[in-house]
Structures are given as C-alpha cells and as structure tokens.
Amino acid sequence: MDALSRRHERANGAARVKFKLGTDGRTVLGDLYQRAPCRVLFPSVERDERMQAVLLTTSGGLTGGDRTDVQIDVASGAEATVTTQAAEKLYRALSHEPETSIQVGMTVGESAWAEWLAQETIVFEGARLRREFRADLQTAKEIHGREPLAVAGTRASNPKEAS
C-alpha cells in the first residue's frame, strides 16, 4: 500500500455550550455537548465572578484533515467568559490532506455579556488552516474577543485582536 492510499485517523471534534440565567439570577450551565477531542471544563469561581468555561483538545494538537466545531450560546441576560486551556498547536499536514478546519460560533442574547479569550495558536511549518469565528450579537450588553497567533513557537508581532 503506498503512502497516498493509506488513510490516517483524523479528529472530528465538537463542543456546544449554553449558558442561561438560573432562578436566582446567576448564570448557570443550560446545556453541554462534547465530542472528542473537544472537552469543556468549568472552573470554580467566586460568587461575584462570571461563569467560566475552558475549552481543550485532548489530542495535543491538530493536523491536516482534523476538524473542530465549537458553538457557544450566552442566553439573554447571562454572563460568561470562554477561554482555551493552553496554546493550540497546528502541525504539518501531509501534501494530500485538506487543511485543518476550526470553527467557532458564538450567539449572545439580549442584554447578555460574553468574552472569547482564546490562548495563542502555534502554527508549525507545513500546517494549513481554515479558521472561522462567527458571532451573532442580538442586542448584547457587551462582547470581547481575542484570537492571538504565533508562528513556529515564536510570538507573532501583531496578534489579531477584536473587541
């Protein structure tokens, strides 16, 4: 069997997190779905802090043909901060493989507050990436976002940030 006819196992991960207002007026988890290698952790926070979710990829990095799809929903009046556990690593793709696909979608309801604070992405030589971030901002109170980039282990001089 030649190298082109061998199929490598590729990741097809997903995470869907919904935050909503609880009966006491505090933000609580409304729904959670996760499929490997995507996982979501919820660190303990002080009573006066916003609810937090930490996304991680259990595979240790992504390469050609891997896909992840993360959907975050912050319902009306809810407040949440979503971040990643560590720098995301994108490894070299084989010449016959498609690019790595990373999709993040965020829906922020009326009078809601949301933060997307991803750690940097480390892109190794030969990696190919298609990244998409979409936000549906109904009449959100506030949203902050950040998508930093580093190349081959060195911090990029101008990471892209949006707020």
Image (cartoon, grey):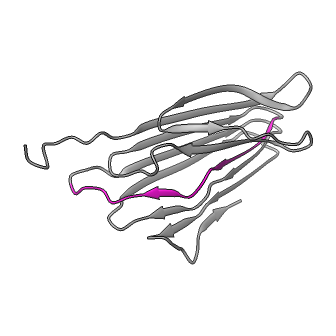
Residue drawn at the location 61% of the way across and 44% of the way down? 55
Residue 142 screen position, x and y as percent:
79, 49
Whether residue 82 is in magenta: the answer is yes
Q: Nearer the viewer, residue 130 or 117?
A: 117
Count of labels in the image: 0
Above or below: residue 75 compared with residue 156: above
Residue occupying the far bottom of the picture? 157
Q: Nearer the viewer, residue 16 or 45?
A: 45
Residue 14 screen position, x and y as percent:
50, 35
Residue drawn at the location 21% of the way across and 40% of the way down? 7
Q: Quadrant of residue 43?
A: top right
Taking the image as shown, residue 11 lies to the left or right of residue 161, namely left
Q: Which residues are magenta?
A: 78-95
Residue 123 screen position, x and y as percent:
44, 64
Above or below: residue 157 compared with residue 112: below
Taking the image as shown, residue 27 lies to the left or right of residue 103, namely right
Whether residue 9 is in magenta: the answer is no
Residue 91 screen position, x and y as percent:
38, 58
Above or below: residue 155 compared with residue 76: below
Can you say which quadrant of the picture contains the C terminus?
Answer: bottom right
Above or below: residue 133 compared with residue 148: above
Residue drawn at the location 32% of the way across and 64% of the way down? 126
